[in-house]
Every structure is written in C-alpha cells, then in structure tokens.
C-alpha cells in the first residue's frame, strides 16, 4: 500500500473510531488462504493444480495441510493430505490485497463474497471462484475445476465491530455476517 493510501486509511479510521493514539488504530496483520478437495486424500496428484494455483495467485509456495486424526466415516487416515494453504504477511500481504481488491473482486460481481464470520479481530470468508484471477485464468484447462478459496484476515482489531470498520476503510464488499463457531 502506498504512503498516501495508508495516510488516508489512518485518517478515515481515526475519524470513525476516535482512538487515544495512532497506535490504537486497527491494522491488518496477515492473511491465510486455503484450498482443499475431497479427492486429494485418495489421489495425491489432484493436489498439484491446487498448489500451483495458490503459488501463482499469491507468489508464495503453499504448505501441505494433512489430517491430524483418522476418521473412518470419511475413509481418512492420519497424515493423509487434505489440501494446501499459504500465510501472507508484510509486503506480500499488501500486494495480495491490492490484487484482490483491484482485480479479482470486481470480476466476481454481483456476489464475490457471500458470507463472513467475524471472531474477535479475525475475519473468515470464502471467495466464490479463483478462476477469475488473471494468473489462474491464463490456463483454463488446468484450473477449470477450482471452485473457491477459504480466506482468513487477521487484524489487530479488538472487536468484530472495529474489524468491520477497518474493512470498510479498505473498501471491501459489505459482508453478511454469520455467527462464528467456537
């Protein structure tokens, strides 16, 4: 984010929240993105396009997410691969948010994000489709089956209301809220 954009965001948040000092303003700390599919546990080759899509979209190599326990009802063994995830902080986070806000969300109209769960300062939401991202759209045959992506934004906000104000300052779409589980 540019210095001017940061200054405008800080001014907007200061007017809306009236903090005691500039250090009390909420900020984004990190973002986690995850992709998974039920077929990955049975065929590990299915994981490759998911990992490649996250690598192309975020610029970082994702880590493999494995099952912690065995579940007989899902025929899942402990340690079996479930999907892949990536965590962004610092400059990669700012770059990702700019691409998300300027490129991906406008292409996913009318409903880019359907619901969000606010829990403390964390915001969890799902993106309807990753195939609209230019990096992924360049190879439609390889990524045609990608359905969506689970996203989580970590903030320093003290409450869900403050997190909503931060997201409104970043011009994210207005979320319908769902109660957070847990």
Image (tube, rainbow, N blue to C red):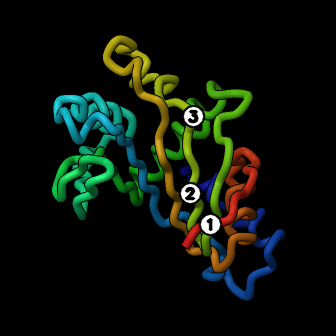
Labelled disc at residue 2:
none
Q: Residues within 10 Å of mark 3 (few under 14, many from 20)?
A: some
Q: Nearer the viewer, residue 137 or 20?
A: 137
Q: Where is residue 49 in the image (x, y as percent from the top left)?
A: 27, 28
* Residue highlighted by disc 2: 124
Residue at the image point whose x is 36% and y is 21% from the top: 143
Which is more toward the observer, 5 or 123? 123
Which residue, given by chain and number where applicable, does mark 1 sit on? Answer: 180
Comparing 62 with 78, the one in front is 78
Pointer 2: residues within 10 angstroms few (<14), some, or many (20+)? Answer: some
Q: Which of marks 2 and 1 is nearer the N terminus?
A: 2
Spatial separation of the CA atoms under disc 2 and disc 3 = 13 Å
> Is 10 above or below relative to 39?
below
Image point 41% across, 18% down: which residue?
Answer: 144
Mark closer to the observer (1, 3): 1
- Please report whichever mark, 1 or 3, sits nearer to the chain's N-terminal start: 3
Figure quadrant of the C terminus? bottom right
Q: Mark 3 points at which residue?
A: 128
**Outermost residue to the front:** 73
Say which residue appears at 21% left-offset and 47% top-offset. Answer: 81
Q: Position of residue 52 (x, y in %)?
A: 27, 32
Q: Which of the 4 quarters of the picture holds residue 121?
A: bottom right
Residues tagged 1 and 3 counted as in contact (Cβ below 8 A):
no
Q: Do the residues labelled 2 and 1 touch (CB within 8 Å)?
A: yes
The reply, left or right, for residue 14 in relation to residue 62 is right
Q: What element carries label 1?
A: loop
């Amino acid at each position: 984010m540019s210095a001017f954009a940061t200054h405008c965001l800080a001014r907007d948040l200061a007017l809306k929240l009236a903090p005691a000092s500039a250090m009390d303003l909420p900020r984004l700390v990190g973002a986690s993105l995850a992709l998974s599919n039920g077929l990955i546990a049975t065929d590990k080759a299915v994981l490759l396009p998911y990992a490649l899509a996250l690598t192309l979209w975020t610029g970082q190599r994702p880590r493999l997410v494995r099952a912690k326990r065995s579940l007989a009802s899902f025929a899942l063994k402990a340690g079996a691969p479930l999907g892949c995830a990536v965590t962004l902080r610092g400059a990669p986070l700012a770059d990702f948010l700019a691409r998300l806000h300027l490129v991906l969300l406008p292409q996913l109209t009318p409903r880019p994000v359907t619901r969000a769960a606010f829990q403390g300062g964390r915001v969890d939401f799902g993106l309807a489709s990753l195939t609209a991202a230019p990096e992924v759209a360049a190879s439609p045959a390889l990524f045609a089956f990608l359905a969506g992506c689970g996203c989580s934004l970590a903030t320093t906000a003290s409450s869900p209301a403050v997190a909503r104000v931060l997201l409104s300052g970043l011009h994210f779409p207005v979320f319908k809220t769902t109660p957070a589980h847990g």
